[in-house]
Image: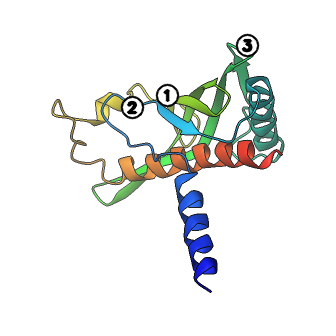
Amino acid sequence: MLTRYSFLLIFISLVAYAQPPKLKLGPGGFDAIDVKIPTSKPEKLVSVTKTWAVERDRRNIDQEKGYDFTDVSDNTITVTGFKKNAFFYNSLGEQFEHRIQYTMKFTFYENRYTMLFTVTQIYTDNNVPVQSALPDYFTGDGILKEGYRNLDTSLENTVNNLVQSHYDALINFR
């Protein structure tokens, strides 16, 4: 009986450990993350990443603009995509929703990868480009400006869901 509980505790620990770190929004955007994964050939991980993006597009998960792949090599790929309803904020009792264009730059190694998520353009819900960038929503001290309540948590949720979705694709391709 004790061995069952020991096994269960080890299994739960490994599952909890085997998740990508959560990205946190700051005035400069998001920091790069380093994620441990089971040993795989980097070329295969690049291929799985392409399949992941194409599948999201095929299922129309984000919006109708599709994906682009650049800087593709044996161990790197940059995915440019769009995310509908990426974040919202409340100001003076009104809620504003925005779409984003983003890049996810991946570098794969045999048992880990790095990923840098960058918001390259912000759009209104009607696909009109917004003239501001993420740093414009923060004070010089790195604090979210007044009038943008929920922007950070809603964008972090969106980004972390994308990162988790990609991670799940990498883990489950086997």
Disc 3 target residue? 73
Disc 2 target residue? 29
Q: Is residue 102 visible?
A: no
- State if disc 2 and disc 1 touch (CB < 8 Å): yes
Residue 104 at x, y percent in the picture = 59, 29
Q: What's the CA distance linking mark 2 and mark 3?
A: 26 Å
Above or below: residue 21 compared with residue 70: below
SS for dot 2: loop
Mark with earlier residue (2, 3)? 2
Q: Is residue 43 left or right of residue 128?
A: right
Residue 155 at x, y percent in the picture = 45, 46
Residue 124 at x, y percent in the picture = 51, 39
Residue positioned most to the left: 141
Q: Residue at x 81, y 44 (%)?
A: 173
Residue 139 at x, y percent in the picture = 19, 34
**Mark 3: which amino acid?**
Ser
Give residue 44's quadrant in the image: top right
Mark with earlier residue (3, 1)? 3
Display coloring: rainbow
Mark with earlier residue (1, 2)? 2
Please tell me whether mark 3 or mark 1 is closer to you in this view: 3
SS for dot 3: loop
Disc 1 target residue? 118
Q: Residue at x 54, y 59 (%)?
A: 16
Count residues near mark 3 (Cα–Cα under 10 Å), then give few for <14, some for 14-19, many for 20+.
few
Q: Is residue 13 left or right of residue 74?
A: left
Q: In this view of the protein, which residue sits in the foreground, 148 or 165?
A: 165
- State if disc 3 and disc 2 touch (CB < 8 Å): no
**Mark 2: which amino acid?**
Gly
SS for dot 1: strand
Q: Is residue 5 visible?
A: yes
